[in-house]
Amino acid sequence: MDGSRRSALADLVCLAALLALAVIGQVSADDPNYMIGRGMYDMTGPAGEINFMGYANPAQTGRGIHLRQFARAFVLMDPATSKRFAFVNIDGCMASQVVTLQVLDLLRVEFGSVYTEDNVCITGTHTHSTPGGFFQYVLFDITSVGSVNQTIQAYANGIVRAIKMAHTNMQPGYVLINSGDLLNASINRSPTAYLWNPAEERAQYEHDTDKLMTVLKLVDAKMTGIGMISWFAVHCTSMNNTNRLISSDNKGYAALLFEETMNPGHFPGQGDFVAAFAQGNEGDVSPNTKGARCIDTGLRCEQNRSTCDGKNEKCIAFGPGKDMMDSTRIIATLQYEKAKELYDGAKTVLTGPIDYRHSYVQISNQTVDFNGTMAHTCKPAMGYSFAAGTTDGPGAFNFKQGTVDGNPFWNAISHLLADPTPEQVACHHPKPILLDTGEMNVPFPWQPHVVDIQLLRLGQLLIAAVPGEFTTMSGRRLRNALKKLVVSMGWSEDTTVVIAGLSGTYSDYITTYEEYQDQRYEAASTTYGPHTLAAYIQNYERLATDMIKGAPSATEAQPAINRHALDLYNYPLPVIWDSAPIGSCVGCVSEDAKATYTAGEVVQVQFHAGNPRNNLLTDQTFLTVEQQVSDDKWTVVLRDSDWHTEFHWDKDSIISTHSIATIIWRTLPSTEAGTYRIQHHGYYHPLAESPKPYSGTSRTFTITA
Ligand SMILES: *[C@@H]1O[C@H](CO)[C@@H](O)[C@H](O)[C@H]1NC(C)=O
Ligand SMILES: *[C@@H]1O[C@H](CO)[C@@H](O)[C@H](O)[C@H]1NC(C)=O
Ligand SMILES: *[C@@H]1O[C@H](CO)[C@@H](O)[C@H](O)[C@H]1NC(C)=O
Ligand SMILES: *[C@@H]1O[C@H](CO)[C@@H](O)[C@H](O)[C@H]1NC(C)=O
Ligand SMILES: *[C@@H]1O[C@H](CO)[C@@H](O)[C@H](O)[C@H]1NC(C)=O
Ligand SMILES: CC(=O)N[C@H]1CO[C@H](CO)[C@@H](O)[C@@H]1O
């Protein structure tokens, strides 16, 4: 109640602001300037046996769900020109070309040429706790042991459903913009690399990460809020590389908190108000604000190389909370609260055209002006420090960040895979090449040579959708270059440029030329060599110039996808048989709840289960917490997408047909006293038949205050 009164008041303030603007002639409050649609749909991938994308930790295979993944779509159209774009934020590690192209194929069937690669932008929050295998490049499919069709299908279908909802519910409205600093939610995880940037450049900024959050407030013609998009740069690595429950991490939970306030009485992912927390230039930005410590001694790591006693594995950064879930909650809450404050206070109305430009760029083959001489980008290659990982998720095998020398043993191994040519070695200098991915094409290409770049314009807002992870200073240089250009060509001084990170396709990191010399993880993962950033900046400037001149943008051909190879290397094997031990049944309780709990305790129930890969239960749930309202009437109070529940799934052994689902409900001291039960739902695979649904129910238990 309190919440809705506050937002009604905020709306009044906004209306007053709009009327004031109307008086000075900028916008008329009874003349909404954009058509706005928004939609949200479940895109949760397979909740078992699939490796998570992000940390490249082979042991981090999925074992259930903490938070579901949602696609959140916004369609914005200028009624004067009928130009529109769709901006889709996904609870996934990043966008990928296979998924993007599949989305476009499905949209074409339904909407013809309304949505194309030019005006659809798909961007990932960068959660490191969601299923992988959705790439056409080997390097990103290694830990998932190939491509995972089920992940690709779940993501593409969820995104398409969200866009269709947004397409269908478009209505006249306004977009307001606001921005402000969010402190304490991020730190730089390669601060010594940042120090390689010129002193006079660093002197222009107070912090070594971007603290600015930019928020769009979407309202209908009556000034009622219908959506929110925010951009803030911070890795979604609050959940660490030991987590095995699907989670949308800090940005996903921030979205659920915002939506819970705006859609009271709805389950997560349902309701009309859609709140997206999108990513920015987060390349070197960590949410683990306590910083890196040696886990054995508790002392600070050696800073430049992030090692303890010469090794990287023990140097790990921790979040502000008592464990990873608590850290996720804290970083999510900070982002939610700042976004809500900026949303409530937004007064500036966006006005002006909608426009967009997209092009495929052969980023591995660009010529740039470097300090007055010609320089080139390189074919893809990853350096030694790439294998060291970061303090958010250290790698194995004794690789260190900041390695510029190589190592004879690993040189031998990497040369077995592909021997870099002298030109390739010189081009990437000082990066010692560990994986010469640009010259590796078996069984399909290892990393992209062609990436997509995109600009979306909404009045005074310019969104630069980038196909990778820009570091703090790289992002600042791109934003500054774009702003300078568009203002010099006549756009207003109050133009805002935001970076939408991890959009379109994925091509790892982009550091500045100076950071590159230090060869920490982000630099070793700057795929196209020291001049990668300069090549991006000149290409985004090209798109902006085309946009302002009204000219089409040149593009390379759409990169071909070797679908045959993806099908051949599809993982994992299908489920063939689920069963329960003799005398029991799939869906039967194997360990029941207690008869009573005190509010605040943890309720746990176990069931004999089927493999969650049999059916993803899209837009449904593997669990329900139900409260008794009368003799035979129960209402569902929580589902598997709620913060307070967990669905864990595990097999007895890799070859066993028996598996167990563990449902956990973390009740709160404020949980209502009453009579409850827990249900588990799923599909099991009888031998030689197709999967069948099953459910199981715990005993009835009471919660006392
Ligand atoms: C660590 O990095 C800083 C800044 O990049 C540099 O000034 C310093 O010399 C480095 N120290 C060592 C031991 O390499
Ligand atoms: C992950 O977080 C848990 C606490 O939730 C902690 O016990 C564990 O040490 C962390 N592991 C890594 C590798 O960060
Ligand atoms: C790189 O670009 C140049 C100039 O655009 C072109 O002549 C050359 O063939 C390209 N090389 C490759 C390998 O695509
Ligand atoms: C660029 O050229 C100037 C003048 O020749 C030189 O002082 C500077 O170090 C060069 N910068 C880089 C990054 O090489
Ligand atoms: C991937 O899944 C889709 C939809 O279920 C199916 O049509 C297609 O045949 C699958 N491809 C492979 C290689 O399994
Ligand atoms: C809890 C915490 O870390 N608070 C810090 C938030 O940021 C401000 C400004 O940097 C610090 O002064 C606080 O100590």
Image (spheres, rainbow, N blue to C red):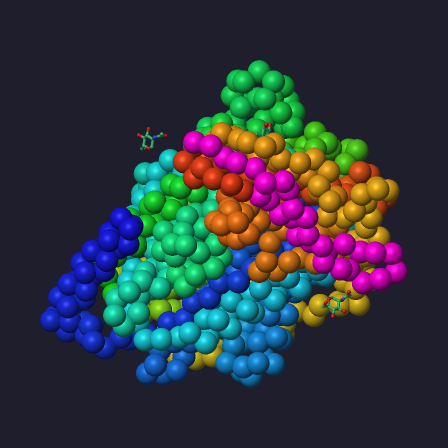
Q: Is residue 166 rendered to the left or right of residue 388?
A: left
Q: Is residue 43 above or below residue 663?
A: below
Q: Is residue 216 above or below residue 128?
A: below
Q: Residue at x 65, y 28 (%)?
A: 313
In the image, which residues are magenta?
677-705
Q: Is residue 223 above or below residue 596?
A: below
| Front residue of this view, candidates 33 and 411 | 33
The rendered magenta stretch, by its main secondary structure, is classed as strand
Q: Is residue 104 above or below residue 411?
A: below
Q: Position of residue 368 (x, y in %)?
A: 52, 59
Q: Quadrant of the C terminus?
A: top left
Q: Is residue 217 visible?
A: yes
Q: Position of residue 143 (x, y in %)?
A: 72, 46
Q: Position of residue 135 (x, y in %)?
A: 68, 58
Tell me which image quadrant ligand 2 sits in. Answer: top right
| Front residue of this view, candidates 589 and 362 | 589
Q: Is residue 209 visible?
A: no
